[in-house]
Image: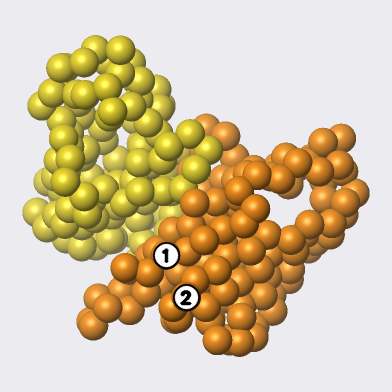
């Protein structure tokens, strides 16, 4: 089974700072999803990246899929308190005819006003 | 539009008592359904998934079981809860194996 490592595990920054969180694996995924989860709620999908090298932007959030489709990053510009939450990445693994979603352990982000 | 409902939102149960958590999806048919457990502020552990009525796959050996009596209903159960069953339980649905997952708001289960 493939593993997805997310780093850092915890991040506490001031409003207005920039940050990057990483999602890494030693194996290839056919696509990768990023979710954000707020306390007491379920994760909500932010974006799916499919093509190696793909970059997607969602307002102040920039997502990149590595060229080899083994890793991904999420960059937040000028972070705001509303960005606080747990950021989870999940990669789609192929195992024969079966497709499985592999979850990272998450990066817990706190943006202080 | 599709919606997913989980209940109850919070539950406090004594050790050794039974459990039944329910999840229903509206606005779609033949969804893939999932049960996850999440430790405090951390990643998701897949417990069960189902691709159709009566079809249940278990990912990890445990004290829990799942059933899918109807197309859009997924139930997580236990006959006797353990302290280690405490956690945040999430239900999710997708249209297919590699499609984005849509989550319910979860059930916070505390075992005393």
Left or right placement of residue B96 versus residue B30 in this view? right
Please check whether the numbered discs 2 and 1 fall on a single chain.
Answer: yes
Q: Which residue is mark 1?
A: A3
Residue appearing at x 21%, y 50% in the figure = B60
Residue appearing at x 41%, y 48% in the figure = B44
Q: Nearer the viewer, residue A81 or A59?
A: A81
Which mark is drawn over residue A26?
2
- Name which quarter of the figure residue A28 lies in: bottom left
**Residue B101, position as x, y percentages in the image:** 42, 59
Residue appearing at x 27%, y 15% in the figure = B13
Question: Of helix, strand and loop, which one carries label 2?
Answer: loop
Disc 2: which chain? A
Can you say whether B85 is above or below B102 in the image?
Answer: above
Can you say whether B90 is above or below A76 in the image?
Answer: above
Can you say whether A41 is above or below B72 in the image?
Answer: above
Residue B96 visible here: no
Question: Of helix, strand and loop, which one carries label 1?
Answer: loop
Which chain corresponds to the colour yellow? B
Which mark is drawn over residue B48?
none
Question: Is the residue under label 1 in contact with that under label 2 (CB below 8 Å)?
Answer: yes
Q: Nearer the viewer, residue A22 or A88?
A: A22
- Name which quarter of the figure residue B75 lies in: top left
Quarter in which the C terminus of chain B is drawn: top left
Residue that protrudes farthest toward the right in the picture: A16
**Residue B40, position as x, y percentages in the image:** 48, 34
> How far apart in space, not on screen, are marks 2 and 1 (Cα)?
8 Å
């Amino acid at each position: 089974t493939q593993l997805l490592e997310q780093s850092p595990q915890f991040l506490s920054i001031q409003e207005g700072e920039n940050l990057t969180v990483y999602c890494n694996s030693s194996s290839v995924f056919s696509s990768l999803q990023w979710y954000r989860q707020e306390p007491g709620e379920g994760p909500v999908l932010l974006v799916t990246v499919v093509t190696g090298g793909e970059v997607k932007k969602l307002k102040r959030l920039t997502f990149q899929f590595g060229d080899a489709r083994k890793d991904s990053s999420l960059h937040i510009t000028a972070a705001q308190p509303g960005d606080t939450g747990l950021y989870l990445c999940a990669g789609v693994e192929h195992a024969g005819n079966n497709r499985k979603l592999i979850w990272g352990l998450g990066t817990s982000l706190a943006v202080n006003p | 539009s599709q919606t997913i409902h989980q209940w109850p939102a919070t539950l406090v149960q004594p050790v050794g008592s039974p459990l039944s958590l329910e999840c229903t999806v509206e606005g779609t048919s033949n969804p893939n359904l999932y049960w996850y457990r999440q430790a405090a502020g951390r990643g998701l552990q897949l417990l069960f998934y189902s691709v159709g009525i009566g079809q249940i796959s278990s990912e990890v050996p445990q004290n829990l079981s799942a059933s899918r009596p109807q197309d859009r209903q997924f139930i997580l159960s236990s006959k006797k809860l353990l302290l280690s069953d405490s956690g945040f339980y999430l239900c999710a649905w997708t249209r297919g194996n590699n499609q984005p997952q849509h989550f319910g708001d979860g059930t916070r289960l505390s075992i005393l």
